[in-house]
Image: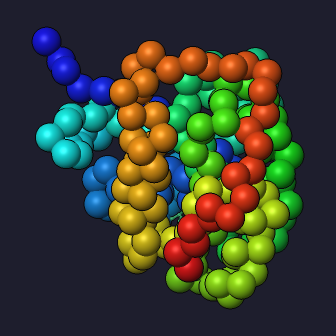
Amino acid sequence: MDQSKSIKIILIGKGYVGKTSLLLNYTKGVFVDTYQTTSEGLERRQLERNGEKYNISLWDTAGQYLFHSILPMYVRGANAVIMVFATDSLHSFSEIDDWKSKVMKRGTNEDTVLVLVANKCDVQRMTENDMEQLATFGGYDLCFQTSAKTGENVNRMFEETIDLVIERFGDNLQKRDIDLNREKQPKRGSLKCTC
Ligand code: GDP
Ligand code: MG
């Protein structure tokens, strides 16, 4: 019998910001330079923490589908939501708030770990101050600057997200309650930024 607890993590963000690349870097340790709109899917990874086994499922999809009817299914039961934008595209950041409120209304609760990721930091880097301000204003729990190309902060981003999920959900990982209509309230003062 599989004794592992399940953790569901979803990645959200505009197309081309690097969601699939971040996942592939974390789960397979590779970086693919060509853009493949069809490569979205589900990646799995197992890990152990304090003698306990966890099955991590990482959900990735093409941004445009999220506006349609599959959004509730995609979001339902997510323990962590990773919102990704690209540092070289202001446009990709300006869409984040809209996505976030759509997502948070559909199947998250106040324990859901909310992560802000500024990807492509090898191309352009934000100041730590700017990142912290964006993350604090948006009520995020964690924020990171990453590069799926060089691997900077990628493992750290996923692992710290997973650790916070385990801390928050603990024994309730398989039988958590999902409140479909309650929007997560920011937990002030608890932001951790890695830039
Ligand atoms: P998605 O649509 O959000 O899944 O984006 P992809 O992961 O498919 O990446 C889109 C494009 O950006 C691809 O050409 C990637 O090779 C490239 N890319 C992704 N992450 C990075 C990064 O951190 N740095 C750089 N320089 N390019 C990246
Ligand atoms: Mg993709």
At 23% from the left edge and 46% from the top edge, which residue is drawn? 49
Task: Identify which residue, 123 or 126, lies in the foreground.
Answer: 126
Picture mark count: 0
Residue 120 lies left or right of residue 25; in this view the side is right
The image shows residue 186 at horizontal and vertical percentages of 74, 50
Look at the picture and state if 74 lies above or below 113.
above
Look at the picture and state if 131 lies above or below 15.
below
Look at the picture and state if 100 lies above or below 157.
above
Taking the image in four quarters, ligand 1 sits in the one at bottom right
Q: Quadrant of residue 113?
A: top right
The image shows residue 117 at horizontal and vertical percentages of 60, 63
Q: Quadrant of residue 133?
A: bottom right
Q: Quadrant of residue 73?
A: top right
At 29% from the left edge and 60% from the top edge, which residue is drawn? 29
In the picture, the quarter occupied by the C terminus is: bottom right
The image shows residue 151 at horizontal and vertical percentages of 39, 72
The reply to whether residue 139 is visible in this rendering is: yes
The reply to whether residue 149 is visible in this rendering is: no
Residue 128 lies left or right of residue 162; in this view the side is right
Question: How is the model colour-coded?
Answer: rainbow
In the picture, the quarter occupied by the N terminus is: top left
Residue 47 lies left or right of residue 1; in this view the side is right
At 55% from the left edge and 24% from the top edge, which residue is drawn? 77
From this viewpoint, which residue is outermost toward the top?
A: 1
Task: Identify which residue, 47 or 178, lies in the foreground.
Answer: 178
At 30% from the left edge and 32% from the top edge, which residue is drawn? 55
